[in-house]
Image (tube, rainbow, N blue to C red):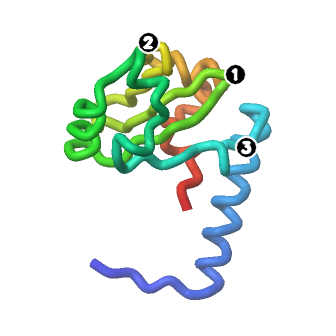
Amino acid sequence: MKMIITESQYRTLLESIDKNKKLINNIIGFDFSDRITQVTSSYDVPNVFFYTAIDPKTINMWLNYFGPMYLFELDGVKYLYQDKGDYEYFIDQEGFEYMDDEIHEKIGINLLGLKFLDIIDYK
């Protein structure tokens, strides 16, 4: 089923998205826009991950199976994020894996019931 959206509906939708982004940015304390990089190949991942955390072949396998990953930095630590369907997966540059809303709590989106993917601005 296709839906036709009028220009006014489109503007309303953009305003709603902008308001949600502002709300999230106010809650977490900073804007994740321009702080998150989409990873589509193991070549996009900093070498620090390969020394301690994960193998490039594993990254490519996950990218092929689950889709893109996202690289971001929080409190001086680099993280890789991937939505794996049933759960959200995070791994930091030291090889620590995070599940069960640990990162969500750290950035303050757990109370909003949002997924990390909801705050990503991947234009």
Up/down of 119 relative to 121, above or below: above
Q: For the point 28% across and 43% down, which residue is it? A: 63
Write down the residue under mark 1: 75
Write down the residue under mark 2: 96
- Mark 1 vs mark 2, CA separation in Å: 15 Å
Q: Amino acid at mark 2?
A: Phe
Write down the residue under mark 3: 31
Q: Amino acid at mark 1?
A: Asp
> In this image, 24 relative to 119: left or right?
right
Q: For the point 49% across and 20% down, which residue is it? A: 92
Q: Position of residue 106 (x, y in %)?
A: 63, 19
Up/down of 64 relative to 13, above or below: above
Q: Position of residue 82 (x, y in %)?
A: 39, 36
Q: Position of residue 105 (x, y in %)?
A: 60, 19
- Mark 2 vs mark 3, CA separation in Å: 24 Å
Instruction: Say whether disc 1 or disc 3 marks the residue closer to the N-terminus.
Output: 3
Quarter placement of the C terminus: bottom right
Q: Crowdedness of circle 1 by 10 Å Cα count: few (<14), some, many (20+)?
A: few
Up/down of 86 relative to 63, above or below: above
Of circles 2 and 3, the one toward us is 2
Helix, strand or loop at label 1? It is: loop
Nearer-the-camera pick, 26 or 62 = 62
Cβ–Cβ under 8 Å for marks 2 and 3: no
Q: Quadrant of residue 24?
A: top right
Helix, strand or loop at label 2? It is: loop
